[in-house]
Amino acid sequence: MLYDDIADPEATSPADLRADYVAELAAVIEARGVDAVADETGVDRETLDAVAAGDADAADDITLEDAAAVAALSDEAPDADAIVAEVRDNLLMGMTTAVLDVDTIAAEMDDMDGKQVHQKVEGRAPMTLAEYARLHHFIASRQR
């Protein structure tokens, strides 16, 4: 699930996480149908089609909030706001546990500076599912 901890970061990669997240969303879309998911979430149909096809690159186009809205349609999932809150809490707690600041994280992210990392983790700037996978994996890999 999007908000689950990464049990063994060494056994996975950001690309693996991204693919897992897309597969999780694809299963929800398959169960509910693209039209129903689009109607219930407001997520662009083209993006949903790409996710439903298992296209891992779709993670570059879907925001964390949109992914949470789709994931929340699963019967066993909490609502979208709870998913997003849990994701953000996990990132912040992981940063605390690993004693990481935003500048340290940004040094590992090719396309983000410390301010951008800070804004994305706190929800003041949009974060794609691909960015989340990278941040989530990096933070988990630094926890002891």
Image (spheres, rainbow, N blue to C red):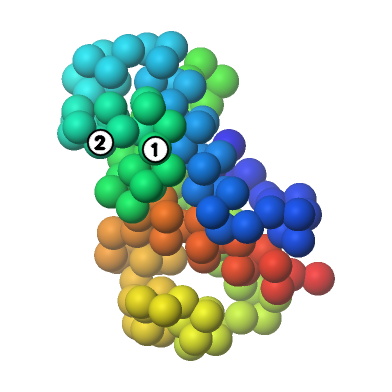
Residue located 22% across and 15% down the image: 35
Residue located 54% across and 54% down the image: 15
Residue located 63% across and 57% down the image: 13
Q: Judge whether residue 117 can be spotted in this image.
A: yes
**Which residue has dot 2 on it?**
47
User: In screen coordinates, is 103 left or right of 144?
Assistant: left
User: How far across and how far down the image is residue 52, in percent?
Assistant: 37, 26
Answer with mark 2 or mark 1, whichever residue precedes in sequence. 2
Residue located 46% across and 77% down the image: 109
Q: CA distance from mark 2 to mark 1?
A: 10 Å
User: In screen coordinates, is 72 left or right of 24?
Assistant: left
| Res 55 label | 1
Task: Tell me the crowding category of disc 1: few under 14, some 14 to 19, or many 20 or more residues within 10 angstroms, Cα based.
Answer: some
Helix or strand or loop: what does disc 1 sit on?
loop
> Which dot, 2 or 1, sits closer to the camera?
1
User: How far across and how far down the image is residue 45, in percent?
Assistant: 19, 28
Of the pair 18 and 78, the residue shown nearer to us = 18
| Three-letter code for the amino acid on which mark 1 is drawn | Asp
User: In screen coordinates, is 15 left or right of 115?
Assistant: right
For the N terminus, which image quadrant? top right
Q: Quadrant of residue 48?
A: top left
User: How far across and how far down the image is residue 7, in percent?
Assistant: 76, 50
